[in-house]
Image (spheres, grey):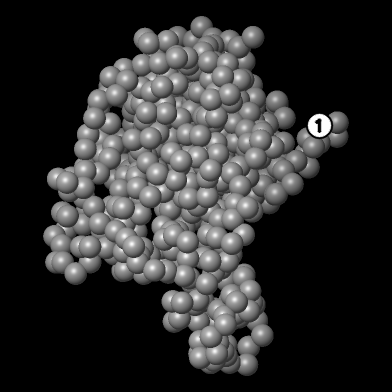
Amino acid sequence: MSSVDEPPVFFSAYFGVPREELDSYGAFDLNLLADVPLFVDPFLLFNSAKPAYQELHEGILTYLRYLKSLSGEELSDATIRDLFRFQEVRQNWFGYCELGNRGQGLGADFARALRLSIGRVVANEGESTSTASSHLEKVSLIQKRVGLDKISDFTTNLIKDFLVEYTETFARDHISDDRCADVMVKRIRFNPVTQTWVDEIHRLPMFENDYVLLTPTDMLVHEDTWINYSDMIARYPEIAAAVDDDVLRDKMNRYFYGALGDSVEKSDVDAARAHTLQSLPELIDIYIKLKEDSADGAVAVSNEEIARLRAVFVEHFADVLKGFLAEPELAGRPSMTSFDEAKFRCGVFKRWVENKEGWKSLNNAKGHAGEAEVQRLIFLALQATDFDVNREVNNGQGPVDFKLSSGATDSTLIEVKLASNSSLRRNLENQVEVYKKANQTKFAVKLIVFYTEAEKTKVEKILKDLDVAETEWIVLVDARSDNKPTGSKA
C-alpha cells in the first residue's frame, strides 16, 4: 500500500475505464506521464478498408493541393505560419517527448521543406500519375530532415476533427461527465471556402487543465512509416531493377557512379544513392509504386508490440513510481520550502538507487542510463507533490531540467548531471559563482550520478577543489553495480 496517493499512469486508470473497453473500441490506452513513441502513418489511412480512413487520406491530399495552388504566389510570413506551420497535437500523448507531452511541433524547417517540395509531393486532381495516389510521406523522401514524427504531427493536425469526434463519442458512453468539459479545440479543421482554420467547442475528457485525445491503434506505427527515407535508400537496387526506360537507366548509372567514384564504403554508397534519387525525381515515384504494390506489408502496431511498449515505457514507470511513493518518509511530512522539497525528493531517488536496487534500472543490457533516462526517473520521484513541477525551464543561465514552485516567490531548480559529463566542473564552478552573488540563497539542487569508482573520485575532487560540501545543494547518487551485495546483482 502506498504511503501517499498514487498518481494514475494510464488513461484507463485516471478516467476509471476498464482497459478492455478501450481495446474493444480500438483505442490505445495512453500513458499520461510521458509520450509513447507511436505515430500516425498516413499510408495506413490510404491502404485501409475503412471508407472513413480513406476519406481522411483524401482530405490530407485536398489540403496539400490547396497549398500547391499557392506555390506561385508571394506569401506573407503570417500566411506561411498559418498554412504551413503546425503545433504538435500534444493531447494525443504520442511522440518522442520523454517527459510530459510537449514536443516541438512543425516549425520553420518543416514549413520550408513543405513549400520547396509541394509541387512534387501532390498531383493535381485528375492528373495521371505512375502511382495509385499522392502521398504526404513524399516530403520525407525529398527533404531528408523531415522524419517520422513530423509526418505524424502533420497527419494528426489534418485529422484532428476525426480524433475529436472519436474521443467525444467514447467519453459520452464510458467516462463520467464530471471528468469532461466543454473546451475550445483550436484549428480543428480547414475550411476551403473561407480558406481559414475553424475552432469548435467539444466535450472532451480533461487531464491537468487540458483535453485528451484518443487514437485508434490501427492507424499507429512504432518503427517508421511504410514509405520512408531509410527504406528508400536500402531498396535502391529494387528501384533500379524496376526502371524499364533505357534512357532513365543510363542516367541513373551515370549519376550514381559519378557520385560514388572509387569508394566502396557503405556511407558513400548510401550518399551516392541519395544523390541519384534526388537528381532523378522519377525514381522516387518508382519507389512509392513499389511500396503501393506491396501494401499488404503495411500493418499497424501489433498487440504484441503494444504490450512491449507498455512494459518498456509505461509499466516500468508505474513500478518505479510505486516504489518511490511507498517510501514511509513521504507520508505525514510537514510543509516545507521548495528547496527542502527538491532536496528531499532527490534524497528519495538517491535511497531508491543505492538501497532499494534502483541501480539495476540505471545499469541494463544497453549500458548505463544517460541523463535523459535519469531525468525520467527523477520526474517520477517528483510526483504527488504539492508543488508545481515544470520541466526544461530557462533560468537565464540556460535550460534547467526541473523547476519546483509554489506561488511567485518560492521556487527551486533541479539539474541532473552524470559524473562522466565533460562539462561537469565548469557547470559546478558556474553554480558556485551564482550562489556567491545570491548571498548563498538556496534556489537550486544539483543531482550527480556516478557509475564507477573513477567517476566517484572525479566528482569528489571537483567538490574539494571548489570547497563545496555534498550536503549543501549537491546530491551524489552511487549507481555502481560492482559495489553492491553479490545477491543483488542484476
Above or below 176: residue 167: below
- Farthest right residue in view: 487
Residue 291, position as x, y percentages in the image? 57, 62
The residue tagged 1 is 488
- From the viewer's perspective, tell me whether residue 486 is left or right of residue 161: right
Taking the spot 59% from the left edge, 55% from the top edge, the residue there is 295
The residue furthest top is 332
Q: Secondary structure at mark 1?
A: helix
The residue under the point 45% across, 27% down is: 342
In this orientation, which residue lies closer to the viewer: 78 or 138? Answer: 138
For the point 42% across and 10% down, which residue is it?
Answer: 176
Q: Quadrant of residue 487?
A: top right
Residue 315 x/y as whole percent: 63, 28
Say if 275 sits above or below 147 in the image.
below
Mark 1 nearby-residue class (10 Å; few <14, some 14–19, many ≥20): few
Judge left or right: residue 286 versus residue 185.
right
Q: Which kind of residue does numbered mark 1 sit on?
A: Ser
238 relative to 420, above or below? below
